[in-house]
Amino acid sequence: MKRDTTMDSAFAPLSHHGRFPYSAITQRRDFHWPEGKRLAVYIGFNVEHFAFGEGLGAKLGAAFNEPDVLNYSWREYGNRVGAWRCLELFDQLEMPTGLIANTALYDHCPDLLRAFQCRGDEIIAHGHSNAYHQGTLNEEQEAALLLHCRQRIEKESGQLPTGWLSPWIGESHLTPDLLKETGYRYTLNWSHDDQPVPMRTRNGGHLWAVPYPQEVNDIPMIIARKLDGSPFAQMIIDQFDEMLRQSDQQPLVMGIALHPYLVGQPYRLRHLRRALEHIQRHREAIWMTTPGRICDHMDTIMPPDQERDQERE
């Protein structure tokens, strides 16, 4: 009987990014974070600037024609008020942050970025503005964006950024390659794991994918899923307690993604305070850190020449 081959392509293996293989978290080599800790916790604090009357922007309320004064001014509250209130909270709890920053803020409100810089916080590149989507750029334009952000942050802060989060987490097929080639060491774009994962790049070597949350993240929780400050704070607490328990089996990374125009609202800040104070009470049991330090530690325990070994395990 002649075999019908018309459907063969429909059941072929699906397209794959080719950046890393599948790996079950229960089947990997064990390691520890500094001082024998098992759970690394970081705050990814997103400070962003948006064009007035054009471009993209988080729609917090009803949106009609441009200029969208309602949503623009709502987001700007984060830079004028919310971020400063959050900064006070982080200082009170002595918690470091990974500051995920648009470079347009150096033109708009440089004092805000300097305040975090003075704390010794890591500055993570986050595009020039969240009014634009990185995934629409061609290779030359995207490479120019990555280089601009790296150079501008170094010029303004003296700190050469090693990490990247795309505006709107938008990527092209070449983004990991271009990040590596521009000098970045890790990306926060991928949310597929609870441990850092090495991603292959086209010219060899790897780019670390440090876990960045899409669940413990105020935008999808508060805007998309219509939760608010109290349940979001409880989500942080529940995530922390369960991951601390799971970390007995494997070392894990817990990120907390925040935006000051949301959690910087006074009544939400009150609930965020409750969640972070809960984490603070367990400070001796965890490594409170930044994504860049996580990347540094991974380089010490798994240099590039061990990458293939990790993939096989």
Image: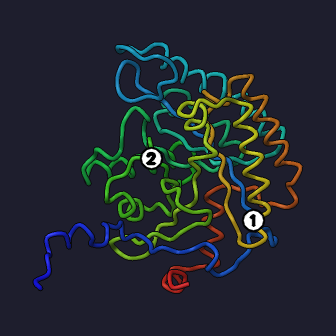
Amino acid carrying label 2: it is Ile
245 w.r.t. 48: above or below: below
Q: Which residue is mark 2?
A: 169
Residue appearing at x 85%, y 61% in the figure: 285
> Residue 46: image x %, image y %?
58, 39
Q: Residues within 10 Å of mark 1 (few under 14, many from 20)?
A: some
Q: Nearer the viewer, residue 111 or 219?
A: 219
Q: Residue furthest front?
A: 1
SS of the residue at dot 1? helix
Q: Nearer the viewer, residue 140 or 60?
A: 60
Q: State left or right for residue 176 relative to residue 22.
A: left
Query: What colour scheme governs how the chains and residues are painted in the rendered image of this protein?
Result: rainbow
> Residue 313: image x %, image y %?
56, 84
Residue appearing at x 55%, y 82% in the figure: 310
Image quadrant occupied by the N terminus: bottom left
Residue appearing at x 36%, y 71% in the figure: 18
Q: Residues within 10 Å of mark 2 (few under 14, many from 20)?
A: some
Disc sitting over residue 246 in the figure = 1
Nearest to the eye among marks 1 and 2: give it.
Answer: 1
138 w.r.t. 168: above or below: below
Q: Does the CB distance between marks 1 and 2 fall below 8 Å?
A: no
Amino acid carrying label 1: it is Gln
Q: State left or right for residue 243 relative to residue 2.
A: right
Classify residue 275 by image quadrant. top right
Q: Nearer the viewer, residue 130 or 71?
A: 71
SS of the residue at dot 2? helix
> Residue 149: image x %, image y %?
44, 46
Disc sitting over residue 87 in the figure = none
* Sequence order check, earlier mark of 1 and 2: 2
Q: State left or right for residue 159 relative to residue 278.
A: left
Tell me the CA gap for discs 1 and 2.
28 Å
